[in-house]
Image (spheres, rainbow, N blue to C red):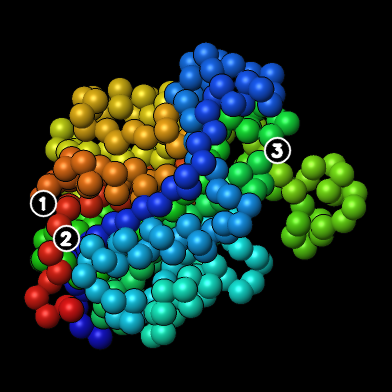
Amino acid sequence: MSAKRSVGILSTGSYTPERVLTNFDLEKMVETSDEWIVSRTGIRERRISSPEQASSDLAYEAAKEALEKANISAEQLDMIIVATVTPDMSFPSTACLLQEKLGATRAAAMDLSAACTGFLYGITTATQFIENGLYKKVLVVGVETLSKITNYKDRNTCVLFGDGAGAAVIGEVTEGYGFQSFELGADGSGGSLLCIPAGGSRTPASTESVEQGLHYLYMAGGEVFKFAVRVMNSATEAVLSKAGVSKDEIDLLVPHQANKRIIDSAVQRFGLSEDKVAINLDRYGNMSSASIPVALDEAVKAGRVKEGDNLILVGFGGGLTWGATLLKWCTTPAEGSK
């Protein structure tokens, strides 16, 4: 094996379904209001997949765009990692289904489950394979069809979630650029705070579990909120410290898009101006593992990211899990890495 390489994001892509579900639509479905939702979450609308769309379909669209922007073919991929809690089915993995759709015949493929932190866990995993020289190109996709597991009679959760997919091609970049540090963590003692109670080996699907609504997403909102505020800040501080970068050197914060108040807490903690934060939850809600890559892709498309910028990607999710990375932006492949 050769020495560690500089690894970064070569390209991004994203996809969100066409159907828009607004707060005013939800007012007709449950006892809630646009004012209540916006004041407490910052969300105004979210995207909903069609009955025919599964997670692999959304992932395909995002992945196809990322591959085109990286100017590589699917056959050049060495591995596909799909981060999701809404796979097409228990097995085969959504990554295998995506591999077949893309025609990525050389690629190993696996799913990764870390809820809203999934994309961060995915890019951290991909980086290790490239750093040690085992692989050259890894596709990481964060995708969710949360509308399929949301109870639209539960006003506490149905206002929060939406569907979408974000993708990134990970590869070797110019020396000194790319990922500078990572921070991953988990606290399994909080697993019951954000979960789907039934459908696994603990509580297999049954008439009773379906009647009780145990296949829908459950969240203890207050407890998760407190956890999120704490770990968003601590994870960001950790990657800054590991990379020897000060908070004043942050050019763009790309946080998990769960709640505007959680993001505001981080913004205030690090003294960031509005133009240094990527926010799109008003249009998409919480897309779990897709939220960070979609927000990143939109920032790139809007011209908000330039070479040499210091980006912080940070999130939290069910598990409970959290993660962050400091990325010195560069999409130029390292010489000889193609």
Circle 2 residues within 10 Å: few <14, some 14–19, many ≥20: many
Contact between labelled residues 1 and 2, with CB atoms less than 8 Å apart: yes
Residue found at x 15% / y 33%: 248
Q: Residue at x 77, y 52 (%)?
A: 198
**Percent of width and height locating residue 287:** 49, 44
Q: Determine whether 195 is above or below 58 in the image.
A: above
Q: Earlier in the sequence, mark 1 or mark 3?
A: 3
Quarter holding the C terminus is bottom left
- The mark nearer the N terminus, 2 or 3, is 3
Q: Amino acid at mark 1?
A: Glu
Does residue 286 lie above or below 73 as drawn? above
Label 2 vs label 3, nearer the camera: 3
Name the quarter where the N terminus is drawn.
bottom left
User: Relative to residue 200, is residue 165 drawn left or right?
Assistant: left
Numbered circle sitting on residue 307: 1
Name the residue furthest top. 35
Label 2 sits on residue: 331
Q: Residue 91: horizontal and vertical position, in percent?
A: 64, 72
Amino acid found under the numbered disc labelled 2: Thr
Residue 277 visible, this angle: yes
At a point 47% along the width and 45% down the height, the residue shown is 18
Which residue is more in the foreground, 169 or 69?
Answer: 69
Residue 190 vs residue 70, the one in the foreground: 70
Q: Position of residue 83 (x, y in %)?
A: 48, 59
Secondary-structure class at tag 3: loop
Q: Amino acid at mark 3?
A: Asn
